[in-house]
Image (cartoon, rainbow, N blue to C red):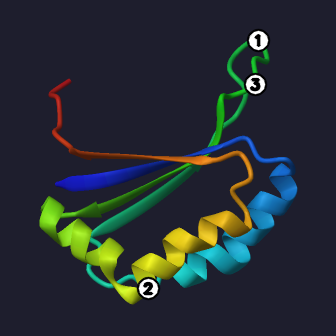
Amino acid sequence: MYRVTDLDGTPSSTQDFDRYYDEKHIPLAQRMAGLTGWTVCRFDPAPGGTPPQYHCLAELYTDIRADLELVLESQAGREATADLDNFASGGAIFLFGEEREVPV
């Protein structure tokens, strides 16, 4: 399984970020055809109260990298990527890689 991880830094307003993300960005990004999975995580402080370095993580999955590239290069993919400028004031980092499970 191949994925892109989007790490969004802490924005100037986490409430504004969360509202925009939930109400506008997710519906926009849901138009991207070809994904096999999508997860989102908003981070909490660490034990002891240390604030997280990032506010939100999104992982988008496809079977292979070429499929992910097609998703991101589509009209909907380009619009969703450009939309980050509307709410991700803390910056965004994209990491690409093949996921593998480790037995436990």
Tell me residue 104's x, y (percent): 20, 24
Q: Is residue 35 above or below residue 48?
A: below
Q: Is residue 27 above or below residue 64?
A: below
- The mark closer to the camera, 3 or 2, is 2
Spatial separation of the CA atoms under disc 3 and disc 2: 33 Å
Which label is found at residue 51? 3
Tell me residue 59's x, y (percent): 41, 54
Reading the image, the residue beneath label 1 is 48
Closer to the camera in the image, 44 or 66: 66
Q: In this view, does 85 lie above or below 28?
A: above
Tell me residue 77's x, y (percent): 41, 77
What amino acid is found at the position of numbered circle 3 in the picture? Answer: Pro
Judge the density around disc 1: few (<14), some (14-19), many (≥20) Cα neighbours within 10 Å: few
Q: Secondary structure under badge 1? A: loop
Residue visible at 61% across and 73% down? 83
Q: Are marks 3 and 1 in contact (CB under 8 Å)?
A: no
- The mark closer to the camera, 3 or 1, is 3
Q: Quadrant of the N terminus?
A: bottom left
What amino acid is found at the position of numbered circle 1 in the picture? Answer: Gly
Q: Earlier in the sequence, mark 1 or mark 2?
A: 1
Q: Secondary structure under badge 3? A: loop
Reading the image, the residue beneath label 2 is 76
Spatial separation of the CA atoms under disc 1 and disc 2: 41 Å
Q: Is residue 63 visible in the rendered structure shown here? A: no
